[in-house]
């Protein structure tokens, strides 16, 4: 109600209208019985109480109607089902039942040899099935839901569904096998069974993925000819960790070519367990170990037996010592390999050495940092380039054809007795003397210092070995003609006495080793004329303050270099 009821238009500032509005709003909001109120212009309005009451009635009605409608749909579906079953049963010998128990209980009403269909057969995992009614009982005929059951079967589903190019989903999944699909692993659990199952699934070559996590193995993993080409790949050295919890080698390759390990860390738990990270045995050719870390293994981390690892590649391998462990051997070649394929070690980062056993050859080591390359006798065809050594440099018993260049050594390089085709050059720092010890060879060895100066290597003369040189204590020749003796003369001859006439040096061609080298220096002045030194049959004539290098090519001596002192 309104007290003053002025009927003034909207926007009125009449105090009486303000009074009427306040009175009406109080009634509209706070009334607990009235469902309507009349505004000051005479129109009915719903009170808050009225709005709530109407809403409750509307909701109740909607629920009631929906319940009735849903029940109607349910009843209609049941009727339709029953009608369909009845119609199908009436049309022939096929009888329908909801469960197997119902069919069994009603066998007396099923014609002999009649066909029975069961909607939800509890004996067949709830599938839709059919049976024949025989004298002996219900005889199973077919599972109409077999495809559905096969699709959800872990062992069969992926084999049924097709993929691109006529392959199945299983074919696609086996392109990369995830070890976590074969066991609850990766959180420090023992993973032996999961890896065995994954290897069996690969059935030969394939890729087994180790997602980020820690995988624990309690026994050695031996790969044979049945696993040719099998690859183990992690998600990175910091995230995929393989932990060994037993004594012995973690991986062993026995006649298993083309295996590879990459993108993971192998932890040997030094001090608790012993053994290597991997042993590559005979006929396990072309293995690849790259972008991975090994730590805490006793003995060498990676080892190749004789006639193993033909064509091997070890790339970007970091080998770390365990807690309290001393110097380690990051990689060791235990013997000579067959064939001529190079074994490549690229960018090693070892808290220890690379060891080459007797007879190892065709080895390529480049970049990276190790404490030393330590070899036994008869090693040859070695290529060592751009490697930095922490404290020991190179200790090599050279067989021949060895090239060492672009390296940096904290201590001297020691090339022990050997021969034929040894080349060492471009050393990057001063190191400690002597640079080379006890070296006999027919190849060229020199030292290129940081300032660009070049020095011949120091080497001791070995009796009856053509081609050995001695820079320290070279032979001094007087004012006389000279005949070079290839089996006894030093290979650096200095004519340092003033010439009083033209002189010559005779160079024999009999009993001279192929590749024999000789340096001649004429530092003597002239007395009484511009005297010269004739160098054998080379056509070379030396004047005061000059030098030349020669080599025997098997038939004659040839000048390879010359210049002024």
Image (cartoon, helix red, strand yellow):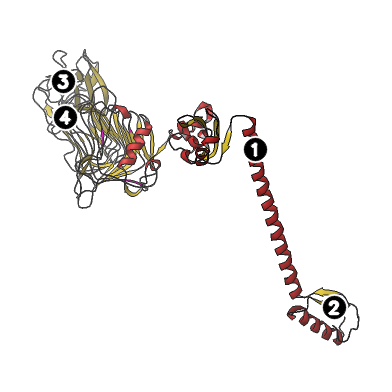
**Disc 1 from disc 2: Cα separation:** 63 Å
Q: Nearer the viewer, residue 533 or 58?
A: 58
Q: Residues within 10 Å of mark 2 (few under 14, many from 20)?
A: some
- Residue bearing mark 4: 358
- Determine the residue positioned at 18% across, 32% down: 357
Q: Quadrant of the N terminus?
A: bottom right
Q: Which quadrant would the C terminus be assigned to in this image? A: top left
Q: CA distance from mark 1 to mark 3?
A: 132 Å
| Disc 1 target residue | 84
* Residue 300 lies within the magenta run: no
The stretch drawn in magenta includes residue 248: yes
Tell me the residue at 68%/46% (across/down).
76
Q: Quadrant of residue 366?
A: top left
Residue 546 visible? The answer is: no
Residue 562 on image: x %, y %: 26, 25
Q: Which residue is mark 2?
A: 39
Which numbered disc flags the more N-terminal residue, 2 or 4? 2
Camera-near label (3 vs 2) is: 2
SS under mark 4: loop
Q: Position of residue 249 (x, y in %)?
A: 22, 39
Q: Is residue 360 above or below residue 19?
A: above
The numbered mark at residue 501 is: 3
Measured Cα–Cα span from mark 1 to mark 4: 87 Å
Describe residue 411's horizontal placement relative to residue 35 as left or right.
left
Mark before the other along the chain sequence, 3 or 2: 2
**Distance CA(mark 3)–CA(mark 2):** 144 Å
What kind of element bears circle 2? loop
């Amino acid at each position: 109600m309104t007290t003053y009821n002025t009927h003034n238009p909207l926007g009125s500032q009449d105090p009486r209208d303000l009074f009427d509005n306040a009175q009406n709003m109080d009634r509209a909001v706070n009334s607990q019985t009235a469902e309507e109120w009349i505004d000051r212009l005479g129109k009915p309005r719903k009170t808050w109480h009225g709005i709530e009451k109407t809403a409750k009635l509307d909701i109740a009605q909607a629920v009631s109607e929906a319940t009735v409608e849903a029940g109607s749909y349910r009843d209609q579906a049941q009727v339709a089902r029953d009608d369909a079953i009845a119609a199908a049963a009436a049309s022939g010998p096929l009888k329908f039942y909801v469960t197997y128990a119902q069919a069994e209980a009603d066998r007396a009403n099923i014609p002999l040899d009649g066909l029975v269909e069961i909607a939800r057969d509890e004996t067949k995992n709830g599938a839709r099935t059919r049976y024949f009614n025989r004298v002996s009982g219900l005889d199973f005929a077919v599972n109409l839901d077999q495809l559905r059951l096969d699709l959800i079967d872990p062992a069969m589903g992926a084999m049924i569904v097709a993929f691109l190019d006529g392959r199945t989903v299983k074919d696609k999944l086996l392109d990369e096998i995830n070890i976590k699909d074969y066991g609850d692993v990766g959180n420090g659990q023992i993973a032996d069974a999961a890896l065995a199952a994954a290897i069996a699934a690969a059935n030969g070559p394939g890729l087994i993925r180790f997602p980020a996590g820690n995988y624990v193995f309690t026994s050695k993993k031996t790969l044979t000819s049945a696993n040719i080409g099998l690859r183990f790949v992690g998600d990175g050295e910091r995230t995929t960790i393989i932990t060994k919890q037993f004594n012995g080698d973690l991986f062993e390759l026995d006649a298993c070519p083309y295996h590879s390990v990459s993108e993971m860390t192998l932890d040997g738990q030094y001090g608790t367990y012993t053994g290597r990270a991997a042993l590559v045995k005979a006929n396990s050719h072309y293995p690849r170990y790259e972008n991975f870390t090994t730590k805490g293994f006793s003995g060498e981390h990676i080892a190749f037996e004789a006639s193993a690892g033909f064509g091997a590649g070890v790339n970007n391998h970091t080998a770390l010592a365990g807690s309290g462990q001393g110097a380690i051997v990051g990689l060791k070649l235990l013997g000579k390999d067959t064939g001529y394929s190079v074994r490549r070690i690229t960018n090693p980062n070892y808290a220890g050495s690379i060891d080459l056993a007797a007879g190892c050859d065709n080895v390529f080591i480049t970049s990276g940092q190790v404490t030393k390359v330590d070899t036994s006798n008869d090693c040859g065809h070695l290529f060592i380039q751009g490697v930095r050594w922490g404290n020991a440099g190179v200790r090599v018993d050279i067989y021949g054809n060895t090239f060492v260049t672009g390296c940096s050594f904290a201590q001297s390089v020691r090339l022990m007795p050997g021969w034929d085709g040894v080349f060492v050059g471009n050393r990057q720092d001063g190191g400690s003397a002597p640079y080379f010890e006890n070296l006999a060879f027919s190849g060229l060895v020199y030292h290129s210092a940081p300032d660009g100066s070049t020095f011949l290597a120091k080497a001791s003369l070995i009796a009856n070995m053509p081609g050995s040189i001695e820079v320290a204590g070279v032979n001094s020749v007087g004012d006389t003609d000279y005949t070079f003796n290839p089996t006894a003369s030093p290979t650096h001859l200095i004519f340092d006495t003033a010439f009083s006439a033209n002189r010559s040096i005779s160079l024999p061609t009999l009993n001279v080793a192929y590749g024999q080298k000789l340096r001649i220096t004429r530092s003597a002045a002239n007395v009484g004329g511009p005297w010269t030194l004739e160098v054998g049959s080379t056509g070379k004539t030396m004047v005061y303050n000059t030098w030349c290098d020669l080599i025997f090519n098997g038939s004659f001596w040839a000048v390879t270099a010359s210049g002024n002192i």
